[in-house]
Image (spheres, rainbow, N blue to C red):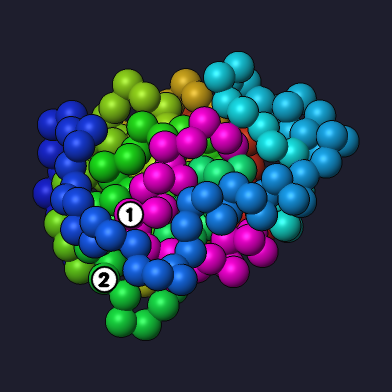
Amino acid sequence: MRRSPSSRTPAPNCGRQGSRAVTEPGAPTAEGVRAALEDAASADERAKIERRMTDARTEVIGVRMGTVFDIAKANSRMPLTEVDRLLDSDAYEMRMVAVSILDFQARMKGVDRAALYELWMRRLDRIDTWDYIDRSAPRVVGLYLLDHPRDVLFELARSDDRWHRRTAITAAFSIIRARDLDDPLALCEILADDPEHLVQTNVGVALREIGRVDPGRLEEFLARRGDDLSAHARRTARTALI
C-alpha cells in the first residue's frame, strides 16, 4: 500500500487517551511490576546494566532481561492506563516492561491496535533507547500501519531525533514482512546517508529483509545508494544476496 510521504514534523502528543481511567480490581498495576522487579534485582546485574547506560538520569533496578520479559508476560493484560504509568518511570526496566507489554498485546487477537499505537506515539519521548524501539515498534507501530496512512513514518524519518528516525525504519519491518516494499524503500532512501550508527544498523536490516522478498529491488537500491550507506549497513543488506 503506497502512502504519500510528508515533510511535517511529528507532533509529540499525537495520540488519544482511550484507555479507562480506573483500573479494575485485580488488574495488573505499575506498583505490582515495580515490586516484582525489585524482588528480582541484584547488585551484579545493576552494575552490568549501568555500564551500558548513556543517560545518567535513568535509574537501573538491576534485573536481567529474561526476567524483565517474564514479568512483562505475566502482566501482559495490564490496562493501558497502568502501562502509561510504567512509561512515566525513570527506571530502565520499568519502561522495558511497558514496551514489552505493548508488544505482547499487539500480538493478541481482537486487540484495539489503535489504542496501542496511539499510546506508543503519545509517549514517544519515553521510548528513547534502541532496545525499547526494537522491542515494540515493529508490532505496535508497524502492524497498525499495515492498513493506515503512513505519513507519520516519513515525519519520523526526517526528524532531528535519532530515536525517531530509528523508529521509522524499525516499524517498517512489519510492513516488509507483509511484502509491501514501496514505503520501506522510500524510508531507506531518506535514511541511507544517516550519520547515526544506531539508525544505519536498522536501515541495513530493513534492506536485507527487502532483499529476501525481492532481490532485484535490493540490487537496484544498492547500485544507486550503496555508497551512501555505512559499511555495516551495506554488509548487512548484502547478506540477502549471498
Q: Residue at x 47, y 21 (%)?
A: 195
Image coordinates for residue 210, horizontal then vertical, percent: 44, 59
Q: Residue at x 64, y 50 (%)?
A: 35
Callout 1 secondary element: helix
Which quarter of the rendering shows the C terminus? bottom right
Q: Which residue is mark 1?
A: 81
Q: Which residues are magenta?
A: 68-92
Disc 2 marks a residue whose amino acid type is Asp
Instruction: Report which quarter residue 180 is drawn in.
Output: bottom left
Report the residue that reaches farthest toward the bottom.
109
Q: Residue at x 57, y 54 (%)?
A: 33
Q: Is residue 81 magenta?
A: yes
**Residue 58 in sight in this render:** yes
Compared across the picture, whether 71 is left or right of 158 comes to right
Crowd around label 1: few <14 · some 14–19 · many ≥20 (10 Å): some
Q: Is residue 230 magenta?
A: no
Q: Which residue is mark 2?
A: 112
**Residue 187 in sight in this render:** no
Q: Is residue 51 above or below residue 146?
A: above
Instruction: Report which quarter residue 224 is drawn in.
Output: top left
